Image: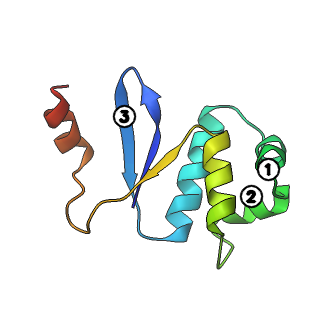
Amino acid sequence: MSILLGTLSFIDIYINMTTLQELGEAVAKRRKILKQRQGVVASQSGITPETLSRFEQGRTAEFGARKLLAVLAVLGMEIQFAEKGTAGSLDELRKERGS
């Protein structure tokens, strides 16, 4: 699974991840880039600040799809799926785009 963190100067930033903890870390990184507080993002996502905090810190065993999609929408993020082993590295993606 890859998360699109956003478009910065027309370069999409993808992070390939395999664990819920990595997903939470990517969300925290994006939230900090946007200078958003956990409480504000949580409120706009319809979850508690403690739930978001646990998710970002990798201290939760589950984080439902609805919660995840709500948080990603608030942060302007999206999920993109690729078959295992087919997702390229950032350097490969840049070469494809001619960057």
**Nearest the eye: 75 or 70:** 70
Q: Position of residue 16 (x, y in %)?
A: 36, 57
**How far apart in space, not on screen, are marks 1 and 3 (Cα)?**
25 Å
The answer to whether residue 34 is left or right of residue 94 is right
Residue placed under numbered mark 2 in the picture? 52
Q: Residue at x 34, y 28 (%)?
A: 11
**How far apart in space, not on screen, are marks 1 and 2 (Cα)?**
6 Å
What is the residue that sits farthest to the front in this orientation?
66
Residue placed under numbered mark 1 in the picture? 42
Looking at the rendered image, the quarter that the N terminus falls into is: bottom left
* Mark positioned earlier in the residue sequence (1 or 2): 1
Residue 56 at least partly seen:
no
Secondary structure at badge 2 equals helix
Q: Amino acid at mark 1?
A: Ala
Q: Position of residue 67 (x, y in %)?
A: 69, 60
Judging from the image, the colouring scheme is rainbow
Q: Position of residue 98 (x, y in %)?
A: 15, 26
Q: Residue at x 50, y 46 (%)?
A: 78
Looking at the rendered image, the quarter that the C terminus falls into is: top left
The answer to whether residue 98 is left or right of residue 76 is left
Instruction: Check whether the beta carbons of the residues at disc 1 and disc 2 lie within 8 A of each other.
Output: yes
The answer to whether residue 77 is left or right of residue 50 is left
**How far apart in space, not on screen, are marks 3 and 2 (Cα)?**
25 Å
Q: Amino acid at mark 3?
A: Asp
Q: Which mark is residue 31?
A: none
Residue placed under numbered mark 3 in the picture? 12
**Nearest the eye: 8 or 64:** 64
